[in-house]
C-alpha cells in the first residue's frame, strides 16, 4: 500500500467534490480530503480523521448555520471564524 499523497501531489481529480453526494477522497481509510473554496478564492483541502459521514453531517450543519454557503460544486466560508469553528470539531484546513 502506498503512502498517503502530500498536498502537493494531490490533483484536481483526487480532490474533486460533488456537493450533492458529498464524495470524499480516502487515504488508507483514515483521512478524508475535500476541496473547499474561501470567498477570496483561496483554495485548500479539509483533512480529518473523521468518517465521510461525520464530515458530511458537520458540513450540512455549517451550511444550515450560515457558516458555509453551498454554490455549485463549492462550499464557501462566510466568515473568518470558519477555520476556528472547523478546528474545534477536529477538521484541519490545509492550504493548497
Image (cartoon, grey):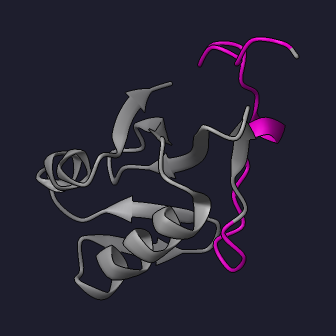
In-front residue for pair 51/46: 51
Q: Which quadrant of the view contains residue 65?
A: bottom left
Q: Residue at x 35, y 46 (%)?
A: 91
Query: Up-down: is 26 above or below 55?
Result: above
Instruction: List the single residue furthest toward the right.
Output: 1
Q: Which quadrant of the view contains residue 40?
A: top left
- The answer to whether residue 53 is left or right of residue 55 is right
Where is residue 75 shown, x and y percent of the image?
47, 64
Where is residue 49 shown, x and y percent of the image?
48, 42
Q: Residue at x 48, y 66 (%)?
A: 54
Instruction: List the single residue furthest toward the bottom.
Output: 64
Q: Residue at x 63, y 14 (%)?
A: 6
Quarter that holds the N terminus: top right
In-front residue for pair 57/77: 57
- The answer to whether residue 55 is left or right of residue 13 is left
Where is residue 52 shown, x and y percent of the image?
60, 60
Where is residue 51 shown, x and y percent of the image?
56, 56
Q: Residue at x 66, y 69 (%)?
A: 22
Q: Main secondary structure of the magenta part?
A: loop
Asked if residue 15 shows in the view, the reply is no
Report the number of numbered marks: 0
Query: Up-down: is 66 above or below 18?
Result: below
The stretch of residues the image draws in magenta is 2-22
Asked if residue 2 shows in the view, the reply is yes
- The answer to whether residue 4 is left or right of residue 85 is right
Amino acid at each position: 500500500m502506498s503512502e498517503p499523497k502530500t498536498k502537493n501531489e494531490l490533483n484536481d481529480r483526487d480532490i474533486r467534490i460533488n456537493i450533492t453526494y458529498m464524495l470524499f477522497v480516502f487515504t488508507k481509510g483514515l483521512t478524508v480530503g475535500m476541496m473547499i473554496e474561501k470567498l477570496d478564492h483561496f483554495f485548500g483541502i479539509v483533512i480529518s480523521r473523521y468518517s465521510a459521514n461525520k464530515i458530511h453531517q458537520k458540513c450540512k450543519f455549517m451550511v444550515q448555520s450560515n457558516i458555509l454557503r453551498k454554490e455549485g460544486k463549492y462550499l464557501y466560508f462566510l466568515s473568518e471564524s470558519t477555520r476556528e469553528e472547523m478546528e474545534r470539531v477536529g477538521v484541519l484546513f490545509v492550504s493548497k
